Image (cartoon, helix red, strand yellow):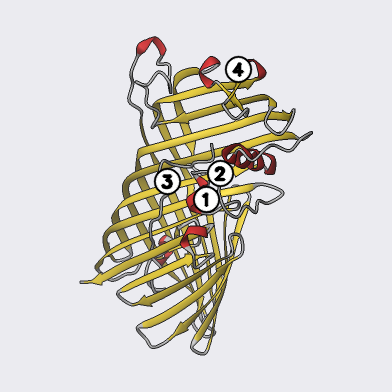
């Protein structure tokens, strides 16, 4: 139930020198104000995947291993972005790929999922209040952006920019679970819950997954747009730099013929497996349909302030979306005019990021553990920039 997409996704992204465009933060926010003015070609990919409860490799599986949920909302986050194209006079035109998902689950929902998957026994006398939401999509398309430079007087300069993307939908999933579960013993409970799931990857030919209305077999499709904006304020005397960018400042996807299921889980549909654990028959109450969905893209904000101290630069930053903050703190070491090394710490998922940067390329890794099998969050970024 907590699975975002069919496979665990790990992609990569760009963190280039300040004069080059980059995607920043855990949400991979692109700031068009950073577009360079020289001519060249570029390619970049960035992704981050993490959750609050279990190892990433267990998130779509059986939830084995260490389990440490939050008392409030427990998040599962996926943000991936890849772009390649050409740059000239502040313009960037490139082919774009995006994939993102956000899972929000209450502590009760998280506990119930883990106990169900592991058949470890339910808490006797407990009523689980279910509150679970998943919203995600995958798309490719084209991206055009432009930066502008303005002198503000004195030592201050303002760079600002706008970007527009055309998006062609590849995948969408919107799922909610609401209701409650009351335990009768360690193996049995009564449920009064509803699951609503719209998923473009539902196999509409499989009666066990979808009851095609009137036998009609339709193929979903989606397209949309996204508008980005950003600015960078610089002081040439002190080296102070402040940055603000908003991805999906305005944006939406329009999906047609999207398969959807609504399932009610109640005492009337339950049965027991060979070990005596309660199970439910979703086909008994499932209502299937096709729907047209207009999906508003959630704005994603990146804010950062950086200040140089000799060969070092310290930075405080944060990403924000849907009421959730993802703060970071980092330091960059300038080894020489061409090489930089950056280290930073993300406070939400407790990951450490290390980046090696050159004027022509960059590569970086991020994780909360040196053991990939037990990591609850990790990411990878990389990019190249070739001047003509």
Q: CA distance from mark 2 to mark 3?
A: 21 Å
Q: Is residue 166 above or below residue 338?
A: above
> Which element carries disc 1, helix, strand or loop?
strand
Residue at the spot x=29%, y=69% of the render? 385
Across and down, in percent, residue 378 comes to: 48, 60
Q: Nearer the viewer, mark 4 or mark 3?
A: 4
Q: CA distance from mark 4 to mark 2?
A: 27 Å
Q: CA distance from mark 1 to mark 2?
A: 6 Å
Label 2 Cα crowd, 10 Å radius (few <14 / some 14-19 / many 20+): many
Name the N-terminal-most of marks 4 and 2.
Answer: 2
- Mark 3 highlights which residue? 226
> Which element carries disc 4, helix, strand or loop?
helix
- Decide: marks 1, 2 in contact (CB < 8 A)? yes
- Mark 1 highlights which residue? 77
Q: Nearer the viewer, mark 3 or mark 1?
A: 1
Name the N-terminal-most of marks 1 and 2.
Answer: 1
Residue at the spot x=44%, y=69% of the render? 150
């Amino acid at each position: 139930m907590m699975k975002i997409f069919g496979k665990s996704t790990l992609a990569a992204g760009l963190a280039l020198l300040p004069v080059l465009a980059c995607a920043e933060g855990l949400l991979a926010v692109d700031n068009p104000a950073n577009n360079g003015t020289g001519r060249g070609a570029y390619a970049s990919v960035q992704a981050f995947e993490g959750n609050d409860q279990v190892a990433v490799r267990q998130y779509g599986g059986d939830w084995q291993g260490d389990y440490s949920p939050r008392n409030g909302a427990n998040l599962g986050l996926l943000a991936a972005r890849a772009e390649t194209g050409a740059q000239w006079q502040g313009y960037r035109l490139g082919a774009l790929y995006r994939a993102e998902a956000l899972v929000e689950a209450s502590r009760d929902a998280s506990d119930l999922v883990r106990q169900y998957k592991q058949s470890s026994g339910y808490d006797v006398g407990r009523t689980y209040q279910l509150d679970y939401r998943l919203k995600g999509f995958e798309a490719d398309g084209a991206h055009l952006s432009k930066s502008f430079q303005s002198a503000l007087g004195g030592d201050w300069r303002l760079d600002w920019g706008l970007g527009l993307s055309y998006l062609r939908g590849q995948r969408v999933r919107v799922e909610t679970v609401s209701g409650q579960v009351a335990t009768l013993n360690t193996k049995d409970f009564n449920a009064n819950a509803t699951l609503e799931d719209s998923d473009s990857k539902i196999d509409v030919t499989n009666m066990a997954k979808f009851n095609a209305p009137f036998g009609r077999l339709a193929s979903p499709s989606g397209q949309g747009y996204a508008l980005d904006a950003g600015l960078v304020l610089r002081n040439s005397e002190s080296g102070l730099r402040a940055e603000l960018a908003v991805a999906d400042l305005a944006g939406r996807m329009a999906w047609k013929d999207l398969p959807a299921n609504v399932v009610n889980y109640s005492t009337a549909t339950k049965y027991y497996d060979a070990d005596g654990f309660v199970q439910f028959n979703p086909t008994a109450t499932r209502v299937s349909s096709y729907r047209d969905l207009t999906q508003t893209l959630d704005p994603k904000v990146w804010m950062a302030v950086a200040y140089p101290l000799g060969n070092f630069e310290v930075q405080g930053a944060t990403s924000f979306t849907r009421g959730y903050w993802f703060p970071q703190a980092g330091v960059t070491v300038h080894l020489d005019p061409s090489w930089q090394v950056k280290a930073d710490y993300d406070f939400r998922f407790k990951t450490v990021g290390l980046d090696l940067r050159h004027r022509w390329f960059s590569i970086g890794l991020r994780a909360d553990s040196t053991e990939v099998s037990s990591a609850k969050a990790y990411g990878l970024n990389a990019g190249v920039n070739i001047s003509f």
